[in-house]
Amino acid sequence: MRVKRQKRYRKAVRFLKASFGFREPFKVLCDGNFQHSVLHNIRKGSEDFDKLLSQALGGAAKAFTTRCINAELKKLGTSFSDTLNAARKLHLAKCDHEPAKGGSECLESLVESFNPEHFFVATQDGDLRQKLRVVRIFFFLKTSLCVEPPSEFQQQFAKEEESKRESLKCREQRLLSHTSEDEELPKRSKSLMVRDRPTFKRKRAKGPNPLSCKKKKQVPEVRVLSSLR
């Protein structure tokens, strides 16, 4: 069953890579309740979030937190001190919230619209999972790390993008065919003109007349003597 689940998750990751431009190392935003579940309920003190997420995704992954999430963990008191210490070791995603917002609100702002930074989100918050339909969600079910399948919104968006690419490809092929025809037309017409044109014998320049090249004969001078008187 575990192998089938991993295959299903990796198929979902391939879908994201092909349709939405996700690339390794994958970036996963982990909220406070997810981090706490990993440390105290699932992994019993393990802090290797990158390894856990990489195994689920089938590729290199980095776990991220934010200043707002860390501030929220700090407010929860000593019972979350271990989680806060672990959170400070994660990669920090930049957020400019002053003063700090709640963890869920901070995550929503980072993946709003079409998730330009290509974040995954790891959360145990059911309400947050319903709001963030444009991203892939991690959550724990009992002791298993689960990845939500592609939402209807994502599937529809991928189909629309694919149809756009296909129409663009067809348009480019038509343009290329027209261009090649335009280039072939002058060549064709030129070859036809050469074939249809009547051939005329050119008059070659003739050499000089050999008779005109003969030297003139010298006529001997005849002296006429005047008669004697």
Image (spheres, grey):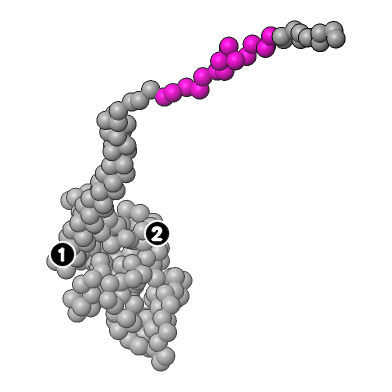
Q: How many marks?
A: 2
Q: Secondary structure at mark 2?
A: loop
Residue closest to the eye, 25 or 192: 192
The structure residue drawn at horizontal position 44% and vertical position 74%, both measured from the top left corner, is 92
141 left or right, relative to 109: left
Residue closest to the eye, 86 or 79: 86
Residue tagged 1: 156
The structure residue drawn at horizontal position 31% and vertical position 67%, both measured from the top left corner, is 120
Residue 57 occupies quadrant: bottom left
Residue 170 location (% of width, % of height) = 21, 52
What kind of residue is marked 2? Answer: Pro
Q: Secondary structure at mark 1?
A: helix
Query: Is residue 108 shown above or below 9?
Result: below
The structure residue drawn at horizontal position 27% and vertical position 30%, both measured from the top left corner, is 196
Residue 25's disc number: 2
Residue closest to the eye, 144 or 180: 180
Placement of the C terminus among the 4 image quadrants:
top right
Q: Is residue 192 visible?
A: yes
Q: Is residue 205 covered in magenta?
A: yes
Sort mark 1 into few (<14), some (14-19) or many (20+) by Cα contacts within 10 Å. Answer: few
Q: Which residues are magenta?
A: 202-217
